[in-house]
Amino acid sequence: MVSNIKSYMAELGSKARLASRKMASASTEQKNQTLFAIAKHLELQTEALLVANQKDMQAGVEKGLDAALLDRLELNPARIDSMIEGLKQVASLSDPIGEVNGMKYMPSGIQVGKMRVPLGVIGIIYESRPNVTIDAASLCLKSGNATILRGGSEALHSNQAIAACIYTGFEETGMPSDAVQVVNTTDREAVGELITMPEFVDVIIPRGGKGLIERISRDARVPVIKHLDGICHVYVDDRGDLEKAIKVAFNAKTQRYGTCCTMETLLVNEAIAADLLPNLAKLYAKEKVELRGCPKTTGILAGAGFDVVAATEEDWSTEYLAPVLSIKCVADMEEAIVHINQYGSHHTDSIITEDYTRSRQFITEVDSSSVMVNTSTRFADGFEYGLGAEIGISTDKIHVRGPVGLEGLTSEKYVVLGDGHIRQ
C-alpha cells in the first residue's frame, strides 16, 4: 500500500530519469539480450500469468465490466505466445539509436547531419490490456528509453506478473531494472502526478477510453501522443469487387469488436447497395451484429427481411466497440470521403475498388493516419505493420502518426563536425 502518492511517483520518476541515461548508451546487443531474456521468462511463467489474469477476469465479471473490456483484459496461451513473438520481432528490428543521416559539407567546411536519439522517459497510461505492459516495455527498451507504466486497476494482478518477468530479464543481463517501472498502486492520484512531472517525464502516451485520454490531454504538463476514438470506415465503391467487399467488410467488423481499428461505419455506393447489403446482412446476422442504417439502407434490408434500426446523427460519430454497425449509402466516392473526414476520427479508413485512379484519390484525400485499399481496417496494428509491437496509435500530426513503433519513440539532434573551423 502506497501512503504518499506524490513522493512515491517522484521516486519512480527520479529512478527512471537516471536509468534513461544508462539506456541511451546501451548497445544493441545488450538490449536484444534483455528482450530475449524477458521472452524466455514469459514462456517459463505462462501458467503463473494465466492464474494472475484469471483473478483479474473474475474480478472484472464481478464488477460488471462489459464484453469489450473483458476481451481486452483476457490473456490466453495464444496471446502470451503473441507477446513472446513480439519481443523476438522487436529484437530482430534494426536499432535506430545512433543512426546519423544526411551528413553533408556546408560552404563553411563544417559537416552537418542528424543523429537519432531516445526521447528519454516515457509515461504510459493504459486500461485493461495487460499485453500493453510487454509491448511498451519492449519498444521503450529497444529504443533506449526508460518508461513508467501505469496500467488499469482491473489488470493489476496480470501487470504485476508480467512486470516480474521483465525485472528478471533485466537483472539477468545486467541492464538497469529501473528502466521499466510498473506503478504498484491503483490510486488515480498516481496518474495526476505522472502527467505533471516534466522534470522526470518527457512524453505521455495514454491508451484507453475517451474519457481517460481527454483528461490526460487537458491536464498534462508534458507532451502527449494520443488518439481519442477509433471511428473507422470501409467504403465499397461501385467499381469494387463484391466478393472482396463482403470478405473485407465482414472481417473489419467481426474479427474483434473491442479494438480501435474495428470498422464502425460501412459506406456503400448506392449503385451496388441492393446487391451487396443483403449478402452482408446474412453474415452479420449469424454473428448477431445489430445494424443501424440510413433510410436507403433500411429500405433495402427491411425489404429483404432483415432487422435494421434507423441510424441517428449520433451513430455516425460513435465508436461502438461492440457488435453494432452503422451503414450508409452514398452517391459516390466524393460523398464517402466527405463523410469520413467529417465523422471519422482520423484513425483508419479503407476503400474497396478496382479503379486505380479512385484508390489514389481516396488515399490522397482521406485525412487519416492509416488509409487502405482492398483490405480490412483490422490490419492497422504495429505488429501487422512490421513494427514488432506498438505502443499505441497516434492520430496527431506532430511528431508521429499511426501505429507508434521504435522510430516514433525517438527524436533527432544535429551533429556538427569540424576541424578547428570558426565562423567568420
Image (cartoon, grey):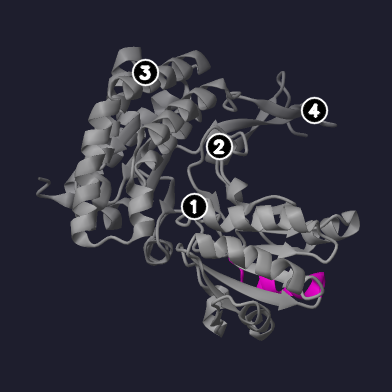
Picture layout, residue 330 above or below residue 121: below
Distance (Cα) linking label 4 and label 1? 49 Å
Q: Which residue is mark 2?
A: 383
Distance (Cα) linking label 1 and label 3? 28 Å
Q: Is residue 341 magenta?
A: yes
Where residue 391 appears, as percent x and y from the top left, is 48, 42
Where residue 188 appears, as percent x and y from the top left, is 23, 58
Q: Which residue is mark 3?
A: 40
Q: Which residue is mark 4?
A: 104
Distance (Cα) linking label 3 and label 2? 20 Å
Residue sitting at x 49%, y 63%:
228
Query: Can you tell which mark lies on residue 256?
Result: 1
Q: Secondary structure at mark 1?
A: loop
Q: Secondary structure at mark 4?
A: strand
Q: Is residue 170 magenta?
A: no
Distance (Cα) linking label 4 and label 2? 35 Å
Tell me which amino acid carries mark 1: Arg
Closer to viewer: mark 4 or mark 1? 1
For the question of whether residue 327 can be seen, the reply is yes
State left or right for residue 27 relative to residue 221. Answer: right
Mark 4 or mark 2: name the one nearer the start of the chain: 4
Mark 4 or mark 1: name the one nearer the start of the chain: 4
Please give the range of residues in magenta.
332-345
Q: Which of these two is toward me, 277 or 220? A: 277
Mark 3 or mark 2: name the one nearer the start of the chain: 3
State left or right for residue 363 relative to residue 304. Answer: right
